[in-house]
Amino acid sequence: MIELKNIEKIYEDNAEKTKAVDGISLKIDLGEMVAIMGPSGSGKSTLLNILGCLEQPTRGQYLLNGNDVIGLKEKQIAQLRNQTFGFVVQDFALIERYSVEKNVMLPLLYTKISKKQRIEKVDRMLELVHLSEKKRALARNLSGGQRQRVAIARAIVNDANIIFCDEPTGALDKKTSASIMQMFQKLNQMGKTIVIVTHDPEVAKQCKRTIFIEDGKIK
Amino acid sequence: MKVLRFVGEDIGKMKYRYGIITLQIIVGLVLFCYIYQVSDSFAKTTGMVQNRLNNEEIYMFRDNTSDKKIDKLLNDDKKLKDMKKWYAEVQKTVAEDSNLQSYIADTDSDINIKRDEYINNVVVSENFMDIYQIEGDFSKTKWKEEFFGKSGNAEEIPVIVGYNLSNKYTKGKVFMDTSRQKYKVIGSLKKGSVFVEPSHSKKYTSLDNCILSPYHLIEDDSMEYWSYVQSVYFVTNHPEKIQKCIVDSKKMGLYDLSLLDFSYQLQCIKEDAQDTFAVYGMFLLVTVAFCIVGIIGNMIQFINDNKKEFAIHLIVGANIKEIVGRVILLTTIQILIGLAVVAVIFGVNKYFCVTAIFASMFMIATMVYPILFLKRQSIRTILRRSYE
């Protein structure tokens, strides 16, 4: 279970302080599919970054399966990002000059598994996201929907249980968005926890629970 | 291993820029090593010469004898005897006074090897090497015996060649001048060997392109005594005894001599050495500055170009140390290539070690900004900035 207790995030720019997250407490059960909604600047992406350990909160407690995450060392946090969390973002965050296979393989390069195992895992993931035939294609030559599927394959290639998605359909058309959301639902049915930050009520509708945020607080 | 793999990719991505910066580093380190080596050798020489001459003056005879009198002196057997006597007196004066040394350094006897091809020949006395602490590959214990002809073949003049001539005139080689006089090479001098010749130059005279041949005075040749008068130098702060020799010469009806001192020339030599150091220092500073600017510029460019990629790596499980390590390794490889070139050119010696220390400090200096930059950024910031 993911549990946040009174989380605050304050950004300091010169003398100016901005409170992006203001005392948020929430619980997300493993296997849940949750949407986080709110207007621009409400702090939803910051919350997602804190959940995904991409940022440290200024104050508060973050428990993952009962373990305090904030006190972990940099290496342990990196391990969490590698083995427990997967990330899917609006602009796909792919290395354009890499092939689909190499992009998906990237998290596995930070583990100690053999090359053979890496290739097997990548093949399985590409099959899951229906991109086996594009294995050797360069990321830069793919369509938006295909890129997002590569990002999803990369997010789960290392058996991550929790997928954090920041506007995953923001750069896609309606049809492609629908297929991507189907893929998230499929992953959720496989037992993965999905947390999606979105503006789109259609996307939120497909999640089991929606958390609304405004001015850094849960509404 | 994985960091090395990514570094390999990084190098491949920017191979031309990386190559140019690597070349710049190679030039910088080679220059550093060269300048350090030359400066060190120069400093040693300067120190040695200054120590030797610091509080002492160099004197030389000025020959004021008229041409008519010279003719008479050179052709009068009685005067030859007086010259021998006077010469012996001068030698005795020098030998008895620990504050007085003399040496011969005759630079007017070039060897004519071929038509229009000459080698600078410096005819030197026994103590010349000791006064200027000149070293080479000749035996320290036996060289005087070999050089001044107490052993060996009398038909061959033993010579010691300057560093730059040592490849052509190897030890044991015999060569002839145009008058068929034979010379035998008995050794070579260390690179950067110098002496002062204040009557000819206001700088150190390098022996790198010279040949040293032994000075012998032929006792029954009156020309030899005249030549001695022209080429003898005295190192002392107490020229009174030499003044007495001048008076004796006049009393004996020999040369009309006076004493020349070289205070001004010696001062020029010292100032010139300081100027040379300043120029070397500036040269080095500019080179190093260019290298630092080049590397830091390259690192900033590299980080800017790869922000997105770094952020992606961080998202999928890299930690910031691995990214910093990747950036450091890029420069480390360049420095190692530079040091390898330095080792090939100069060998692994004291100068290489100092260059390696300099390179390490240089690397630390150039790494400060990239490391601080990367450590200060959160993954979110790096990712966001990669789209700016």
Image (cartoon, coloured by chain):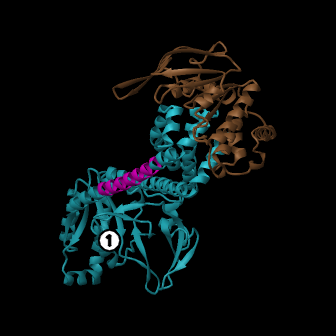
Chain colours: A brown, B cyan
Figure quadrant of the N terminus of chain B: top right
Q: Position of residue B140 (x, y in %)?
A: 51, 56
Circle 1: is it few (<14), some (14-19), or many (20+) Cα within 10 Å?
A: some
Residue B91 seen in the current view = yes
| Residue drawn where x is 32% and y is 78% of the image | B222
Tell whether position B345 is magenta.
no
Quarter of the image for residue B192 reads: bottom left
Does B279 lie within the magenta span? Answer: yes
Out of A146 and B296, give the one closest to the viewer.
A146
Q: How many marks?
A: 1
* Placement of B249 over or under B332, stated as above or below: below
Residue A61 appears anywhere in the view: no
Q: Name the dominant secondary structure of the magenta segment.
A: helix
Residue identified by numbered label 1: B228
Q: Secondary structure at mark 1?
A: helix
User: Closest to the observer: B225 or B378?
Assistant: B378
The spot of residue B159 in percent (x, y) is 49, 70
- The spot of residue A148 in percent (x, y) is 65, 40
| A188 left or right of B117 in image | right
Is A54 positioned to the left or the right of A161 in the image?
left
Q: Residue at x 54, y 21 (%)?
A: A212
Three-letter amino acid code at disc 1? Tyr
Judge whether A67 appears above or below B73 on screen. Answer: above
Name the chain letter of the residue that bears numbered label 1: B
Q: Which residue, as the protein is rendered here, is positioned at the far bottom?
A: B115
The one nearer the camera, B63 or A66, is A66
Q: Which residue range is magenta in the image? A: B273-296
Residue lying at 69% horizontally and 28% vertically, measured from the top left = A83
Q: Position of residue B351 (x, y in %)?
A: 50, 49
- Towards the viewer: A30 or B343: A30
